[in-house]
Image (cartoon, helix red, strand yellow):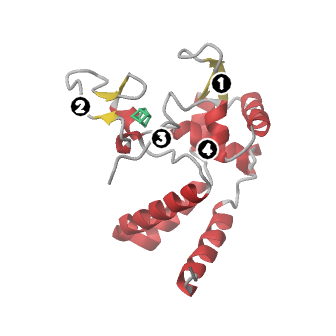
Amino acid sequence: MPISTQALEAAHLLDRIERLARAGEHDDRLNPAQWEALRYLARANRFSRTPAALADYLGSTRGTVSRTVASLEEKGNVSRDPSARDGRSVALALTPRGEQTLKRDPLLAMARDIELAMGADVENLLDGLRRTLRQAIARNDGRPFGACRSCRHFRGNARPSSRQPHYCALLDEPLSDADSQAICVEQEPAAA
Ligand code: SF4
């Protein structure tokens, strides 16, 4: 299928924006991979904060991710503990210092640029970007890492009086409102 000049220009723009978004990522003694790992840990649910899921999300090798996590641990941004669900696995978490570091995330400047440029049209931009991302993930045979509430296994308000009112039918686990917003390694999009 021939590619339109508009689609090609959009790809060039995304490439340029991506590079500009990374400006400043070498400040704060962190490198781009370390920033990406921190952002992932801030957004992922408790089933997904593992080195293996992080490697899948970043499209990286386990060895590279292990070095990234070790460096973040040394700097006090990330903790690593045995997983409560699977004793053979490791659970990663942001430390309070990691949460503070993310308040200086260089990506926030790009979020401000988007707000200024798009205003109320930001929903249209999001829709187009989400569809583009889905296409790119399918082409690369990757996992979607979508939000829990849009998963086909999500059962909203299954237990309305509970502090964890939602339910995961795949993992047989209760889910809070915050869980429902998080991204998940097991997420499978619900049929449109
Ligand atoms: S409902 Fe889906 S996205 Fe949510 S925890 Fe279960 S598998 Fe993950």
Task: Say if 129 sits above or below 165 in the image.
Answer: below
* Viewer-nearest of discs 1 and 4: 4
Q: Which residue is mark 2?
A: 157
Name the element at disc 2: loop
**Mark closer to the chain start, 1 or 4:** 4
Q: Which mark is residue 57?
A: 4
Residue 130 placed where, x, y %? 46, 60
Q: Earlier in the sequence, mark 1 or mark 2?
A: 1
Residue 99, given in percent of the width and then of the height, sits at 57, 36
Q: Residue at x 39, y 40 (%)?
A: 181
Residue under numbered circle 3: 183
- Count of residue discs: 4
Query: Do the residues bearing badges 4 and 3 touch, measured as CB atoms within 8 Å?
Result: no
Q: Amino acid at mark 2?
A: Asn
Residue kind at label 4, given as amino acid type: Tyr
- According to the image, label 1 marks what residue? 79
Query: Label 1 to label 4, Cα distance in Å?
Result: 19 Å
- Is the CB of the residue bearing disc 3 within 8 angstroms of ligand 1? yes
